[in-house]
Structures are given as structure tokens and as C-alpha cells.
């Protein structure tokens, strides 16, 4: 059967234009008959001849034109197929389930699979799964490693309805079936250059000797230069292995610059310089310790130096003998296994006392707050600051929401009958109503904004002062006008007692006020058995002169029978993990202050032979509070920091959410196992 091929669209219109012009010629011929009959006849003959010629040309050229178009389309398709086949970029066509339908020569060359290979793409690239191919995104990008090369994989979906929309041969029902076009882009060299560029970037570091003066004071004068020379040699030799530039900028400070590629080696080495420098002995009784701050990933070298400066401040604020690596918002810690040496000089306390007085004199209202679920130390420190503000005639108020059973005997002294204002203690809600931009907010016994009694109060004023004895973490109160953080101090009450001695000459404490501050020292030192130094006893002696009475304080700190039994149950049911870690749970029934009971029980667990660290978990107010304690061998602060907590080397804690007590207990065990494997805990 003969089949006629018809033209359509723009090509059909183009071919019909000569025929359409015939109509125009006929219309033009009509006026010619009116002008001249002979001219009209001649034009009519011309029109007929033109029409016959056009029809003949159309019928003669149409098959030729169609054949040319078909040949062009065939050649064009062949050219396209050849171009794709010879395409320099590896290309493959996959079906809906990821089966290979067709690949070009470059893809075969890269993968080693010929064109007859029609298995799943997952058999070649395990990272490209059916689930990834069938996701909703029309285009997606993956990064894979294959045969030692790095590839960027571009995946593009090709839907059947789009391919057959203009087809008059087949019709597709609505379906989600599609093909996937896969392109491989070799980025091995690009990533190599990026990696080399990153490795060549300079990292800034600051190295400080923590106890320079104290170490020199412990040896003879003739050996001091030898000690300094040996420390210099240790520092220079250690960083020389990393092709670093080391310059001594002060007698106890060094500036270090090295390439980024060596930072990973230092981290894997866990900065062994910290332990190596402690071996320097020339008759000095005190081991030399270092603090190192490293800044990285800054946009400029100046920014890296700023990161290093912030890191060294954080390292010193955490007690020294450690390395802090600051990479933008990320902060890493190494070392920190030694107790900070207590400073014999009180110069810093005197300077802070004078600075605090100047700040208080410039403010009319003072709000004092400690951490949430306040303890005796935060309460006693708040009372001390209240007394300092009172001497200057300033309106001071203590922000506290919940009065625990341990604080109630202390708070009962501060009544209107005893001469104290009725609004001496206010709630967080009331404080937020009263505070203004020029008020002073005094934070004691914590340096983390999320741990304060009222975090919102810090955002309502430009003047914030921080007094604390806990080691700093990455979360800090921003831009305080005065920050006095001393990790070597036994308690915040000790720090406040020192400051009060230099605050003013005529400051006087009532006996019960001195009792509160003394009680804070007593609790945080566990009756002078933990973190107790010379200055601790000097602060206690000052409070004794102010009227503090040991017997009276002991009566204030007594507890009821239910609390005592609860603490005994915690000790009785403790599990000993790995022969050195005591882990127990504090039940909250019939106990008014379960978190305090947990902390006390953690202290008592250390009295058991063989226990190096204790952990007591308490479920309270929708959170799980973990109190951890150690004597000297285990740094519990490092353990608690893994859960977002912190504290001291031998006294720390954290708060866990979204888990049960049993899960929290297992998390602590898993963390201990991990830290032992990584070498952060030595048994």
C-alpha cells in the first residue's frame, strides 16, 4: 500500500507560500481587465503558467526534501550517538531500579566494564543504591571514591512522559517510571590541590608556662637559667619536628607558627610536650606545666592569631596544663590532668576587689544570682556580694527561685525582723520586671549562661560581672565587664572572702553572714579534704575573725534522717565498673533536694578502697543530673564535658535529657570505655 508523507508545521507553511502567491496574482489580474483587456489576458496567461510551474515544482521537490530531512535526522541521531559514545565524561543510562542499560566508551574505560555489562550500578559503586536513585529529587550529586580516584556523580532523572509527549506513535499512562542519566566527574586533582592548599595554610599557636615564677622560686638562683634553658629546648625541639617557627615573646611565653598538615599529627600525639616538659628537673620541687592555645580555620592569619589568643585564655581559665584548639566555633581540649598550682600572691584578688568596687559605685541596682538549684557555695557567695553592695549603699537583691532544704536554715536568718529588706530575695520573674539596661547583674559560682538561675537576665543589661571557681568551657557569658574565674580556688566563697578583705576598710559582716560564706567553703572542700590550699585556710581565718562559728555552721548543715538514709542507699547500691568506677542511682522519693544528696553520695563513694572516680545519677525536674567525683588519678571534668557539662579535675557534673536513668548509666559506661581506648583515661 502506497503511503503518503505529509508535511506540517512551519515547513508546510513555507512550502505553501508560492501557491498562496497565486491567489494574490489572480486578485491583481482583475483590475488589469478594466484598464486594458490585452494586458489582462497576458497577465492571466502568466498566472496560469506560474501556477502550473509552482504545482510541478512542489510535487517534484517535496519527496526530495522529505528524503533530505530523513537523511539529516538519521545522520544527526548517528552523530549524537557517536558524540555521547565518544564523550570525554563517563556516561551511563540506568533504568528505574538502577540496572545499567547503556554506557559510553569512557565509562567502560573508567570502570573496566564493557557495554554488555547490564547489572546493577551498585555492583560497581556501592554508594549508589536503589533507594538513592528512587528519591524524589530530579537531580542529585554524590561523591564517591573508586579505584583510588575521587569522583563527583551527577544523577539526572529522565521521565518517559517527557520523552513521548510529542510522539504520535506511543502514549504513556501516568507513571513514576523514569530513566537515570549518570555522569562521572573526576575531581581527584582538584581535591588534591584543595587538600594541598589547606595543608599549606599557617596555624597560629601560643605557648605559656603556667607556673614560671613558682617553679623558679623552688630552686637555687644558679640553676634558674638552666631550668629556663631546658624548657626552651623542649619547646623548640618539639615544634621543630613540625617545621614550625618558634619565637619567645616574653620570659614565659612563646609564639608558634606551623603548617596545617602537622596539626593532625600533634592531635594524634595528644601534644606529648605537656608531659615531656614535666620531666625537666634541676632540683625544682615543682614540675613545670604548659598551656597551649592553637587557632585554626580563620579567614585570615590575624583571625587565626585571635583564635589562638582566645584558646590560650580558655586553657588558662580551665586550670592550665592543657591544650585548647579553637577552629571557628569548634573547640577541642587535650591534657588537663594536673591540678592547677595555687597562686601565693593576692595581687589579683586585690585588683579584682578594687575593680568590683568601681563598678558597684556606678550602679544603683544590683542583681545577684548563682546557678539553678542553688547550693551552699552559690548562696554564701551571693550573701558576700550583697554585703559589699550594702556597704556602698546600693540596692542589692538575690535572684533565687527554689530554696532547697540545705539552704533553708541559712536563709531563715535574713528576715525583716533581723533588719533585712523584704525584697532581699526575689524570683526570676520579678527580676526580669525590675532590671533595666543600666543595672548590674552579678553571677556567682557558674560561668555558663545556661546554668544560671535566670539566663534571660543576662540579656537585659550591658553590665555583667562573673565570679566563679569552675573551669571554663566553650559556653561562656559574653562580654562581662569584670570576670574573676580562678579554677585553683576551693570555692566561690573563698574568692568572695578574699575580695571582701580588700573591698573597703570598714566592711563588717554579721556572724550569720560569715557563717554562710564559711559554710560554702566547708561544703565545696568536703570538710577541707578536697581542693584545699593555703589561701583556703586564710579565707576561713578571715571569716572566723568576722564571727563565723564552726559549731553553729555544723548545726546549720545537718540533714534529716530521710536524706541520710537516701545517701546511704546510693552508696549501698553502687555498681563498681572496671574495678575503679563507682556508678549509682539516687532515688528521689522522700528527698527534698535529691541533686545535693547525689553530690554528697558521690563524695562518700571515694572513701571506698580502689574507687578512682564516682558517678551518681539523679532524675529530677525532667532531667538527669550526674555528679562525678575523683581524688587525683581521673579527670572527671573531661568525662563530663563529653556530655556538655564541666567543672573541676576532681569534681564535675552534667545534665542529660531525652534518655532514661538506665540509658544514661550505659552512656557513661560506654564513654569510659571509649576514653580508655583513646588513652584519655589511664588505669
Image: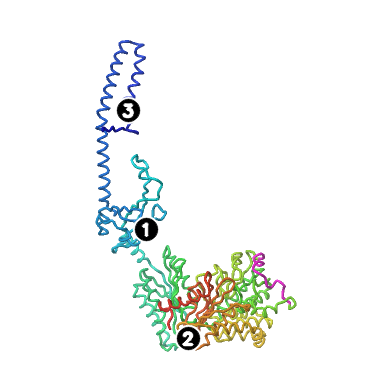
- Find residue 609 and report its horizontal and vertical position in percent: 50, 89
Q: Please state which of residues 383 and 440 is positioned toward the viewer in this rendering.
A: 383
Q: In percent of the image, x 24 and y 32: which residue is there? A: 64
The boundaries of the magenta stretch are 419-434
The single residue placed furthest to the front in the displayed view is: 1
Is residue 421 shown in magenta? Answer: yes
Q: CA distance from mark 3 to mark 1?
A: 53 Å
Q: Nearer the viewer, residue 22 or 232?
A: 22
For mark 3, what is the residue?
16
Name the N-terminal-most of marks 1 and 2: 1
Mark 2 lies on residue: 217
Colouring of the image:
rainbow
Q: Is residue 439 left or right of residue 257?
A: right
The residue wearing badge 1 is 130
Q: Looking at the rendering, in which quadrant would you find the N terminus?
A: top left
Seen in the picture, residue 607 relative to 95 is either above or below; the reply is below
Residue 546 higher or lower than 261, as above or below: below
Q: Is residue 437 magenta?
A: no
Left or right: where 480 falls relative to 135: right
Amino acid at each position: 500500500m502506497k503511503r503518503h508523507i505529509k508535511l506540517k508545521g512551519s515547513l508546510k507553511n513555507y512550502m505553501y507560500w508560492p501557491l498562496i502567491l497565486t491567489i494574490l496574482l489572480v486578485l491583481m489580474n482583475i483590475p488589469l481587465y478594466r484598464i486594458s483587456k490585452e494586458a489582462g489576458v497576458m497577465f492571466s496567461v502568466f498566472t496560469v503558467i506560474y501556477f502550473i510551474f509552482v504545482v510541478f515544482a512542489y510535487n517534484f521537490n517535496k519527496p526530495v526534501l522529505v528524503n533530505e530531512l530523513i537523511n539529516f535526522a538519521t545522520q544527526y541521531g548517528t552523530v549524537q550517538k557517536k558524540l555521547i559514545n565518544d564523550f570525554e565524561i563517563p556516561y551511563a543510562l540506568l533504568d528505574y531500579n538502577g540496572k545499567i542499560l547503556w554506557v559510553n566508551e569512557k565509562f567502560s574505560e573508567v570502570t573496566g566494564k564493557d557495554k554488555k555489562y547490564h547489572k546493577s550500578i551498585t555492583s560497581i559503586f556501592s554508594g549508589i543504591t536503589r533507594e538513592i536513585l528512587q528519591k524524589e529529587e530530579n537531580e542529585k550529586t554524590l561523591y564517591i571514591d573508586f579505584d583510588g580516584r575521587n569522583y563527583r556523580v551527577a544523577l539526572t532523572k529522565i521521565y518517559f512522559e517527557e520523552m513521548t509527549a510529542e510522539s504520535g506513535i506511543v502514549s504513556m499512562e501516568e507513571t513514576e517510571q523514569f530513566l537515570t542519566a549518570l555522569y562521572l566527574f573526576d575531581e581527584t586533582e582538584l581535591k588534591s590541590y584543595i587538600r594541598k592548599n589547606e595543608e599549606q595554610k599557617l596555624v597560629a599557636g601560643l605557648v605559656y608556662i603556667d607556673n614560671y615564677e613558682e617553679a623558679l622560686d623552688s630552686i637555687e638562683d644558679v640553676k634558674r637559667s638552666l631550668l629556663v634553658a631546658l624548657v626552651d629546648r623542649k619547646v623548640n625541639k618539639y615544634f621543630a619536628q613540625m617545621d614550625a617557627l618558634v619565637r619567645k615573646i616574653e620570659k614565659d611565653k612563646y609564639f608558634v607558627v606551623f603548617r596545617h598538615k602537622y596539626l593532625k599529627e600533634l592531635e594524634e600525639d595528644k601534644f606529648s610536650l605537656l608531659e615531656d616538659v614535666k620531666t625537666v628537673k634541676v632540683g625544682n620541687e615543682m614540675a613545670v606545666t604548659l598551656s597551649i592555645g592553637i587557632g585554626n580555620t580563620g579567614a585570615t592569619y590575624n583571625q587565626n592569631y585571635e583564635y589562638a589568643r582566645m584558646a590560650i585564655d580558655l586553657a588558662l581559665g580551665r586550670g592550665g596544663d592543657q591544650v585548647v584548639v579553637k577552629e571557628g566555633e569548634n573547640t577541642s581540649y587535650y591534657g588537663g590532668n594536673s591540678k592547677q598550682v595555687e597562686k601565693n600572691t593576692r595581687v589579683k584578688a586585690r585588683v579584682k576587689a578594687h575593680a568590683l568596687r568601681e563598678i558597684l559605685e556606678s550602679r544603683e541596682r544590683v542583681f545577684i544570682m548563682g546557678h539553678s538549684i542553688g547550693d551552699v557555695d552559690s548562696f554564701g557567695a551571693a550573701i558576700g556580694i550583697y554585703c559589699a553592695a550594702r556597704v556602698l549603699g546600693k540596692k542589692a537583691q538575690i535572684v533565687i527561685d527554689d530554696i532547697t532544704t540545705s539552704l533553708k536554715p541559712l536563709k531563715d536568718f535574713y528576715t525583716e525582723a533581723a533588719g533585712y529588706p523584704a525584697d532581699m530575695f526575689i524570683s526570676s520573674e520579678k527580676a526580669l520586671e525590675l532590671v533595666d539596661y543600666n543595672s548590674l547583674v552579678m553571677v556567682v559560682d557558674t560561668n555558663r549562661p545556661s546554668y544560671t538561675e535566670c539566663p534571660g537576665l543576662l540579656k537585659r543589661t550591658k553590665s555583667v560581672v562573673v565570679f566563679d571557681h569552675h573551669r571554663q568551657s566553650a559556653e561562656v557569658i559574653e562580654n562581662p565587664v569584670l570576670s574573676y574565674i580562678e579554677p585553683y580556688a576551693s570555692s566561690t566563697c573563698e574568692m568572695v572572702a578574699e575580695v571582701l578583705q580588700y573591698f573597703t576598710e570598714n566592711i563588717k559582716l554579721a556572724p550569720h553572714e560569715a557563717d554562710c560564706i564559711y559554710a560554702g567553703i566547708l561544703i565545696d572542700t568536703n570538710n577541707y579534704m578536697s581542693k584545699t590550699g593555703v589561701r583556703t585556710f586564710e579565707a576561713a581565718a578571715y571569716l572566723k575573725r568576722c564571727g563565723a562559728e564552726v559549731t553553729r555552721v555544723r548545726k546549720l548543715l545537718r540533714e534529716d534522717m530521710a536524706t541520710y538514709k537516701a545517701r546511704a542507699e546510693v552508696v549501698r547500691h553502687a555498681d563498681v565498673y572496671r574495678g575503679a568506677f563507682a556508678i549509682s542511682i539516687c532515688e528521689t522519693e522522700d528527698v527534698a533536694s535529691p541533686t545535693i544528696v547525689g553530690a554528697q553520695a558521690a563524695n562518700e563513694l571515694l572513701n571506698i578502697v580502689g574507687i578512682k572516680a564516682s558517678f551518681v545519677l539523679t532524675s529530677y525536674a525532667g532531667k538527669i543530673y550526674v555528679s562525678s567525683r575523683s581524688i587525683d588519678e581521673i579527670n572527671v571534668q573531661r568525662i563530663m564535658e563529653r556530655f556538655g557539662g564541666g567543672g573541676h579535675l576532681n569534681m564535675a557534673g552534667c545534665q542529660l535529657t531525652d534518655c532514661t536513668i538506665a540509658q544514661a548509666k550505659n552512656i557513661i559506661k560506654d564513654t569510659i570505655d571509649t576514653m580508655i581506648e583513646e588513652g584519655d583515661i589511664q588505669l
